[in-house]
Amino acid sequence: MAQVSHQEHGKKVRDMFGRIAGLYDFLNHFLSAGQDIYWRYRQVKLVRPGKKGLVLDLAAGTLDVSVELLRQYPDVKVLAMDFTHQMLACGKNKKLEGKRAERSESIAAVQADGRGLPLPDNCLDGATISFGIRNILPREDCYKEVLRTLKPGARFCILEFGSGSKKIWKGVYNFYLNKVLPLLGKVVSGDSGAYSYLADTIRAFPDERALAEELREAGFGRVMFIPLLSGIVYIHVAEKAEE
């Protein structure tokens, strides 16, 4: 029964993001007042893959993190994987400045399920997921797959909202999350379900300490988390233990 539920959930998420793919970038920037660009910069800075490494950008969406990975680490190769083909298609024309003038040179975009990565063991020099781990059920399957494919000592950097159950800014953020965000998302995108879903999953998401414990239980070694914007967003860094 649980497996059927997870399959249904995955289809619902894929269809929902497929509907809003064309507006995804605009909505991210608009609804976060542009802060999402800085959050991704901070996340990528913590990956530290080394020169000419291979990095997985899981739940890559429209490739913002993939492009930022190449901006900060111009010699790496990026595997951009997402469950929703329309999201990857919307990011295919994003350009890079400098020596990586064409995104297609160093980013391979592939539709894939984070619970079953089409990759061999110990092949990745780093991995990221940005605002995507909430959408994967069960999360433990994703953790195990990322851990399996990382090289010893490599990092898995998760950018995600904190738990919406905590009051932030004396409840102002919670009011924005529960009332304003779904309304704005509906007005701009025309999809009433997508941003209600976003608010619901943030409220139900574990807090930073519980998420860190999930990563440790999955087998990661050193785990740390960094709050951004008063804990509205967190970066979690989980390292695969050295052999």
Image (cartoon, rainbow, N blue to C red):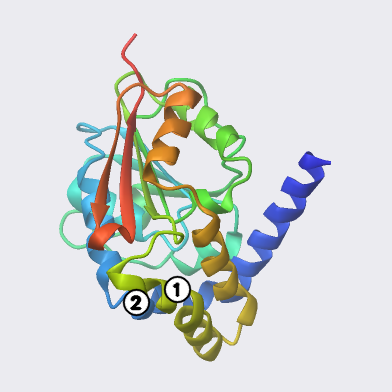
Q: Residue furthest right?
A: 1
Q: Residue furthest top?
A: 243
Question: Is residue 54 rendered to the left or right of residue 136?
Answer: left
Q: Amino acid at mark 1?
A: Leu
Q: Do callouts 1 and 2 mark residues in contact (Cβ within 8 Å)?
A: no
**Residue 49 visible, this orientation:** yes
Q: Residues within 10 Å of mark 2 (few under 14, many from 20)?
A: few
Query: Which one is earlier in the sequence, the residue at label 1 or at label 2?
Result: 2
Q: Label 1, label 2: how many angstroms apart (C-alpha)?
A: 9 Å
Q: Residue furthest left?
A: 98
Q: Amino acid at mark 2?
A: Val
**Residue 92 image position (x, y, % from top left):** 44, 63
**Residue 117 visible, this orientation:** no
Which dot, 1 or 2, sits closer to the camera?
A: 2
**Residue 26 image position (x, y, % from top left):** 40, 79
Name which quarter of the figure residue 113 lies in.
top right
Q: Which residue is mark 1?
A: 177
Q: Which residue is mark 2?
A: 172
Residue at horizontal 44 percent and vertical 39 percent from the top: 210
Question: Is residue 178 rendered to the left or right of residue 74?
Answer: right
